[in-house]
Image: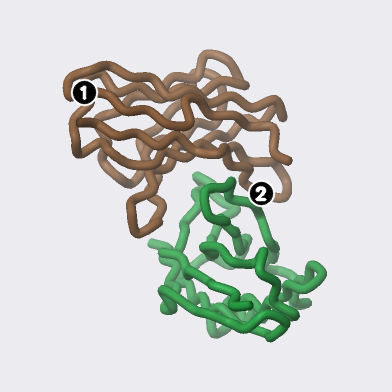
Amino acid sequence: AQTVTQSQPEMSVQEAETVTLSCTYDTSENNYYLFWYKQPPSRQMILVIRQEAYKQQNATENRFSVNFQKAAKSFSLKISDSQLGDTAMYFCAFMTTSGTYKYIFGTGTRLKVLA
Amino acid sequence: EADIYQTPRYLVIGTGKKITLECSQTMGHDKMYWYQQDPGMELHLIHYSYGVNSTEKGDLSSESTVSRIRTEHFPLTLESARPSHTSQYLCASRREGTGELFFGEGSRLTVL
């Protein structure tokens, strides 16, 4: 069975600094997708960034980038130039591309950006 | 902004009442999901659907039921609410190809 582990329940970072959120996963599949989702306080969960397992190049979206290590089954999120609006819960997620296309979420990391 | 809507946003009801949480999306997505989010914010899949007339139970045992009569509509029903059902319920739909999930704003249910 697939699992997703986020080992940092809470983190904080100073505004304008860089922070890295960790995520590891376990699967025997070769093709899958990995995601980071952001849930701001009392607001909708939205997609931050997405990575396809067959792509070696790390995904980037403006200030957000990932370090995808397929062999190590690691998928960390780096936020550069942190802003107050980045304060949120961040969830790492895994989706298979075979069978049920089921989504597996990690337990989340609560990030607080300090002014 | 995602075109997926949940109502009600907040609901306080007494034990034993029947409630239905509504979820609608206008994106034409076949795959839809219901998650229960506990106070620690962890997400638990309680139901999913791959299309009209297709529903499955998720990983977390739930006394709720769902239906999918129309592509855009995926309501969740509790026949007899109990305090243990107090939680936030999130509905989501999935875009084909990218796998991206679009979430509603959530329905926060309190059962007294």
Residue at horizontal 50 percent and vertical 52 percent from the top? A103
Indicate the colouring scheme: by chain
The brown one among the chains is B
Which dot, 1 or 2, sits closer to the camera? Answer: 1
Tell me the amino acid under the disc marked 1. Gly
Dot 2: within a 10 Å radius of its alpha carbon, few (fewer than 14), some, or many (20 or more) residues? many
Residue at horizontal 52 percent and vertical 47 percent from the top? A99
**In the picture provided, is B81 more to the left or to the right than A25?**
left
Give the answer, above or below, for where B58 lies relative to B98: above
**In the picture provided, is B86 more to the left or to the right than A82?**
left
Which quadrant would residue A5 be assigned to in this image?
bottom left
Q: Position of residue A82 (x, y in %)?
A: 69, 76
The extreme top residue here reads B69
Residue at horizontal 42 percent and vertical 31 percent from the top? B10
Tell me the amino acid under the disc marked 2. Glu
- Residue at mark 1 to residue at mark 2: CA–CA distance: 36 Å
Chain letter behind tag 2: B
Which quadrant would residue B71 be assigned to in this image?
top right
Chain letter behind tag 1: B
Task: Locate the C terminus of chain A by quadrant.
Answer: bottom right
Give the answer, above or below, for where A80 lies relative to A48: below
Residue B40 is tagged as: none
Which quadrant would residue B85 be assigned to in this image?
top left
Residue receiving disc 1: B14
Residue B100 is tagged as: 2
Q: Position of residue B74 (x, y in %)?
A: 51, 24
The shade of chain A is green
Q: How many marks?
A: 2
In-front residue for pair A85/B38: A85
CB under 8 Å between discs 1 and 2 = no
